[in-house]
Amino acid sequence: MSRALVITCSDRAHAQVYEDRSGPILRDGLLGLGFEVDAAVIVPDEVEAIRQAIIDGVESGARVVITTGGTGVGPRDVTVRATRDLLDQEIPGISEAIRAAGAHKTPQAWLSSGLAGVARREGRAPALVVNVPGSRGGARDALTVLGPLLGHVVDQLDGGDHPVDPV
């Protein structure tokens, strides 16, 4: 069973001003997909805190790391900045699909600048890192997109072959 990590990036959830709403949705969704997942790690909207949480996740063996929150255009939305230089390879189609799934419900989904890609750390298995919006709807939209992909992505990261098209 592969491990996954959810990182909630929120000043207010970190300060316990309010309860993390999107992290538990992502955790439950990943559990339902067969991943081993602990409770979400909650960090403030600070580049170094987010960056270190992602590094710690990959170094601890997580094969999928999903951050939630901090993907908008506000001054404290720094998750993308914290993530970008950790990715060895971006996978823009994943983020585009998450935005498109959300845009069917709200035009604000187009404002998300979230990234998706592969992070590699010396001596560790590579991980898929995905930034998703911090809303419950954004978390659900992300799971809709990621659900059918995650098993295949982890297999590919481990050197698996592509399925043969029978036609």
Image: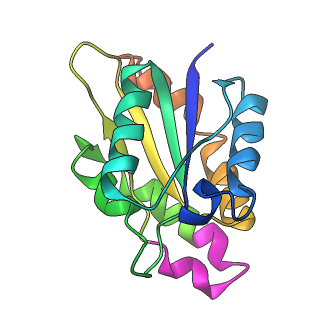
Report the number of numbered marks: 0
In the image: residue 83, left or right of residue 36: left
* Colouring mode (rainbow / by chain / secondary structure / one colour): rainbow
Residue 15: image location, x then y, percent: 60, 58
Q: Is residue 165 visible?
A: no
Give yes or no for residue 101 being in the magenta stretch. yes
In the image: residue 98, left or right of residue 56: right
Name the magenta segment's main secondary structure: helix
Task: State which quadrant residue 12 falls in.
Answer: bottom right
Is residue 124 depicted above or below 9 in this figure?
above
Give yes or no for residue 131 being in the magenta stretch. no
**Could you tell me which residue is drawn at 44 percent across and 63 percent down?**
114
The foreground one among 1 and 147 is: 1
Task: State which quadrant residue 39 falls in.
Answer: top right
In the image: residue 1, left or right of residue 53: right
In the image: residue 120, left or right of residue 26: left
The foreground one among 26 and 75 is: 75
User: Can you say which quadrant of the picture contains the N terminus?
Assistant: top right
Q: Is residue 52 visible?
A: yes
Task: State which quadrant residue 45 falls in.
Answer: bottom left
Is residue 24 depicted above or below 101 in this figure?
above
**Could you tell me which residue is drawn at 48 percent across and 57 percent down?**
44
Residue 60: image location, x then y, percent: 43, 19
Residue 113: image location, x then y, percent: 41, 70
**Could you tell me which residue is drawn at 52 percent across and 80 percent down?**
110
In the rendered image, the residue lying farthest to the bottom is 107
The foreground one among 119 and 166 is: 119
Provide the residue span drawn in magenta: 100-112
User: Can you say which quadrant of the picture contains the C terminus?
Assistant: top right
Residue 143: image location, x then y, percent: 68, 49
